[in-house]
Image (spheres, helix red, strand yellow):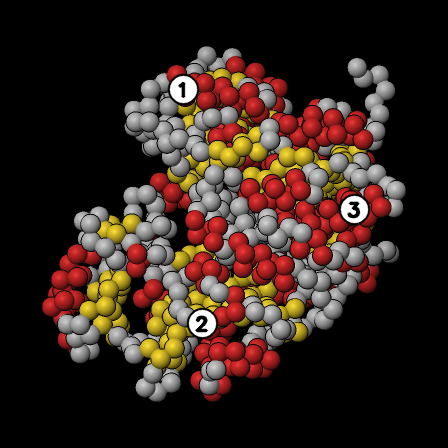
Amino acid sequence: MYRAGPLHRFKSLITASPCQKRYLRIHEYQAQDLLAKYGLPVPRGRITTSPAEVANYLDEIGGRGVIKSQVLAGGRSSGTFSNGFNGGVHVVSSSDEGRHVSSKMLGQRLFTEQTPPEGLPVDKVYVVEHLNIGHEFNLTITTDRSNGCPMLIMSQGGSTGIEELAAKDSYGTVKVPLDYTEGVTEETIVLLCERFALDRERLIPILQSLFTFFKERDATLVAINSLIRKSETGRLICADSRVSIDDAASKRQSQIFDLRDKSQEMAVEIEAEKHGLVYIQLEGNIGCLVNGAGLAMATNDAVAEYGGSCANFLDGGGQATKETMVKAFELILSDKRVNTILVNIYGGITRCDMIAESIIAAAHNFHDIPIVVRLQGTNSAVGQQLIAESGLNLFAEDEFGSAVKKAIELAASIPNPAGAVSETRVESRGSSRIKLTTSTSQRSFRTLSSQCFQNISNTIRHAQPNIRRDSATTIADFPSRPTHPSTISNLNIGQNTKVIYQGFTGKAATSNAIATQAYGTHIIGGVSPSITSSSPHPNPSLSHLPVFPTLRNALASLPSKPQATAVLVPALHAASAILEAIEAEIPLIVSVAEHVPLHDMFRVEAALRTQSASRLVGPNCPGIIAPPAKCRIGIMPHLQYHAGCVGIVSKSGTLSYEAVGATTKVGLGQSLCIGVGGDMLPGTSLREGLEALLRDEGTKGIVLLGEIGGEAEIEAAAFLQEWDRNVVRMGGRRKPVVGMITGKTAPRGKVMGHAGAVAGGFTTAYDKIRALEAAGATIAVHPGEIGTLMRSLLEKEGLFPIKGDE
């Protein structure tokens, strides 16, 4: 069993992660209004849009108050306005002073450490009563990715956000993982009252209302940045708050999403969202169009590695129509600095020749811009030939590195109309270079956050939290992973694995099952809640397979129990299907749906903690495939896989497909590939996927593909180091590992396609790279290097003797 011990040896490499951002963020005045409706005590306040309104309200409350600029960014107090006025939050003593101060704020743009370079507009200011502070605290409920549950954090002294909270002296901070079903327990209440000398009767309703709000409103974060105990009465007041809501729950939280303030967002990113694209503007001159978040981050990183600079991150997803391509090119070229476009697409289900035709059709509208195109996957040779013979300003490149270098070469040969591109500062790291983005505030978090991560990663013995009071920063023991470690062996699928489908008669599941059956996977039936009694599948190709109303019906009727289920249902129904499979004790559950609401996954992970039979892979993942056994459970482009000796565990689907192509190209092939997905709460972690591959006898070498966001790569590195130490001690031979971490150039605070891929946390991509290197992994700069690196390592270790090769 994995122990937390190795994490102690990674203390210099580990930094903790803040609340990861997959959210709608609302203004402070909106958050205060919502919290008040849940019974939380908030000060009197009013939103205003003119100096006259400010003065009038200050007269109503006695003249003394606080004026707060309303922007969706932290650091307001130390910000600067476009007119030179300093400070986005001011205490005023009279209505005349309030009128003067607000006139300097309204209609201006505010610049803070967390705003975009162009700042954010201030169209409203929130005027609140001034309170006499006896004591001040910060009270936050956020998402604990390592434990798969909500986390309550409380500290002495107020702050402007969770980042500042993490930087505080550790003795003043209490952190408690919360069971999603139980919420705030009596033991937690006692701990907080003792630590902060709080009145129990005053604290309990605040804790209970805060957790109820968090749960009922699909919050990813609810933070009382300033919980004040009034000096006169001892009453607790929520003086300042911050709320973020899961965007995957937008349909059931439509009233809150109606509060969205698009003036605080970039117009080009809003336009991209309308067309199903994820666009993030950067500062370079090479426009990028890529499918898949992991591959898009890898492309941006590679451009920086070779000395170029990207103008954007653009994840086109699985769309490849002419209309989508035209819109993508329009978005890219709306940035006048762009003088070259790099298209890097992996065609799995959609063939590369079809993608090429769409690119060519769209490129007719953009004659003046050179476009470098790299297509990989199904029919890639045909697609590349179409690009090369198009007669347009298109450049076909087969290799990842050569495509990137060609784009940089073309961009350098064309004058940049918007002026010089900002320089990329790099850090030397052996044979590769890394762009530096670590801020001073991030560096200051390292000591505390290392201790916090070390604590939350400990193996536990009890299902319920057991709060320790002997450490400066108090934290509850909790399962480091919700899934029982004995179920890791459930990932070893093979020729005899019996698979059932949930959502079996749906269009996606039917198409997938036909292809999976033709591949050689043993499918024994499926479930569809739309039917009332068992019947044959309506599709002729699957009519020999039964369909049942529920899994319970299926298990009662099938001659043998399935070892795995493919959950191919829409995101809002995925959790119910997963829970049904857990109740039925299906050993392996694979859910591929994107945008499963976070709180649905809280319920799933709470259920996983109560059992030791089922293991979940996903959601938001491509699934799992064993090429030697022709067994696929998920949506991988199976025809691109070839039986071999390399295991792959990855957060990114398209990046794992690139690794498949790279290892196939050098004659290695694949043994077992596990796509754990890029969500905040994956059923199987990178560390657990890595363990499965280390234990798999058919796997001789391992590719581990991670990205920014969370701590999974650090945990995997610690486990790898301990595993290899034990292997060597027992006289065995370690399996070589090639690692790659994407998102080195991602802008702070942006969600890079995957819900859990957020830059600007306390653990950077560089920390993860260093941890993997310290564990003995070899790091690839881009996916094109993975195959050659792996083959070289295998041959060096004597694990891959290839007869007949020169």
Q: Secondary structure at mark 3?
A: helix
Examine the rendered structure and indicate whether residue 304 appears above or below residue 557.
above
Q: Earlier in the sequence, mark 3 or mark 2?
A: 2
Query: Mark 3: which amino acid?
Result: Arg
Query: Mark 1: which amino acid?
Result: Ala
Q: Position of residue 206 (x, y in %)?
A: 45, 78
Q: Position of residue 65 (x, y in %)?
A: 22, 72
According to the picture, the residue beneath numbered tag 3 turns out to be: 725
Examine the rendered structure and indicate whether residue 586 appears above or below residue 46.
above
According to the picture, the residue beneath numbered tag 1 turns out to be: 412
Query: Mark 2: which amino acid?
Result: Gln
Q: Is residue 355 left or right of residue 242?
A: right
Q: Position of residue 142 (x, y in %)?
A: 51, 64
Task: Report which quarter residue 741 is drawn in.
Answer: top right
Q: Is residue 796 left or right of residue 573?
A: right
Q: Secondary structure at mark 2?
A: strand
Residue closer to the observer: 584 or 87: 87
Nearest to viewer (mark 3 / mark 1): 3
Give me the C-alpha separation between circle 3 and circle 2.
42 Å
Give me the C-alpha separation between circle 1 and circle 2.
53 Å
Query: In the rendered structure, are the residues bearing label 3 and label 2 in contact, judged by CB atoms less than 8 Å apart?
Result: no
Residue closer to the observer: 676 or 17: 17
What residue is shown at x 53% (from left), y 18% (from top)?
396
Q: Is residue 430 left or right of residue 214?
A: right
Q: Which mark is residue 156?
A: 2
Nearest to viewer (mark 1 / mark 2): 2
Task: Report which quarter residue 457 is drawn in.
Answer: bottom right
Task: Report which quarter residue 579 is drawn in.
Answer: bottom right
What residue is shown at x 33% (from left), y 23% (from top)?
416
